[in-house]
Amino acid sequence: MSGTTGVERGPGRFRRMFNRLTSTHEELEAEELQQDCRQLGCTAIGSVAERDLVTVGGTLRTVTFRPRAGVPALEAELYDGSGALSVVWLGRRKIAGIEPGRQLVARGRLTTAQGRPVLFNPKYELRPVGGGISRPKAGGG
C-alpha cells in the first residue's frame, strides 16, 4: 500500500525552514503581509479586477499630497505582498493616522487610472500600531 491518504499536506518543517533561510527579506515580508491580509478576509491586490467592489489590506508605502484637477488629494500606495494600488482621498490634504508604514484595510470600487489600480475615497480602517490581527481601529472615509 502506498501510504497516500488523500489528505493535502503543506510542506514539512524542514522545507519551511529551508525556504525561510533561502528567501530574501522582501520575500519574507511579502509572504507575511499576504498571510495577514488573508486572515482579515481581504482580496489580494494582485488578483483584483477593474470595477470590482473590493476589500484590500496592507501597508502604506508612500503618502503624498498631489492635487488632481485643482482639487486637493491625498494619495497613498497600499502594498499587500501580492501587488500595490493607489488609495486617493479627494478634497483632503491630510488624514490623521495615514502615514507611511501604517497598516490599513480599505473598501471601495476599484478603477484604473494611468494603467494603475486605484481606490477613490474608500472606507478604511487603520490597524493598530505594532501589528497583530486584533480588531482594527475604525476610521472614516
Image: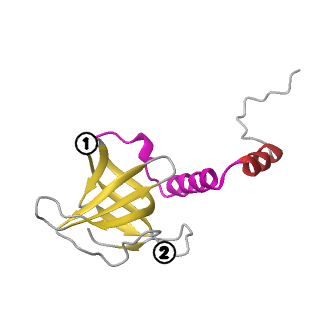
Residue under circle 2? 128
- How many numbered circles are shown? 2
SS under mark 1: loop
Mark number, residue 73? none
- The reply, left or right, for residue 60 in relation to residue 89 is right
Name the amino acid type tagged 1: Arg
- Please give left or right for residue 130 compared with residue 121 in the image: right
N-terminal of the pair, mark 1 or mark 2, is 1
**Amino acid type indicated by mark 2:** Pro
* Residue 24 forms part of the magenta stretch: yes
Residue depicted at x 53% and y 70%: 134
Graded by Cα atoms within 10 Å as few (under 14), some (14 to 19) or many (20 or more), the crowding at tag 1 reads few
Residue 97 percent across, percent down from the top left: 37, 76
Q: Looking at the image, which is closer to me, 25 or 54? A: 25
**Which coloring applies here?**
secondary structure
Q: Residue at x 75, y 41 (%)?
A: 11
Q: Is the magenta stretch mostly helix, strand or loop?
A: helix
Q: In the rendered view, does 123 fall on the left or right side of 129?
A: left
Residue 3 part of the magenta-drawn span: no
User: In terms of depth relative to the viewer, which is nearer, 66 or 44?
Assistant: 66
Would you place residue 84 above or below residue 134 in this image?
Answer: above
Q: Name which residue lies at 49% across and 46% down.
A: 82
Horizontal and vertical percent position of residue 128: 48, 74
Residue positioned 42% across, 63% down in the render:
60
Q: Is mark 2 on a helix, strand or loop?
A: loop
Q: Mark 1 points at which residue?
A: 51
Q: Residues within 10 Å of mark 2 (few under 14, many from 20)?
A: some
Q: Distance between the residues labelled 1 and 2?
A: 29 Å
- The magenta segment: 23-51
Q: x%, y% of residue 135? A: 48, 71
- The image quadrant of residue 1 is top right
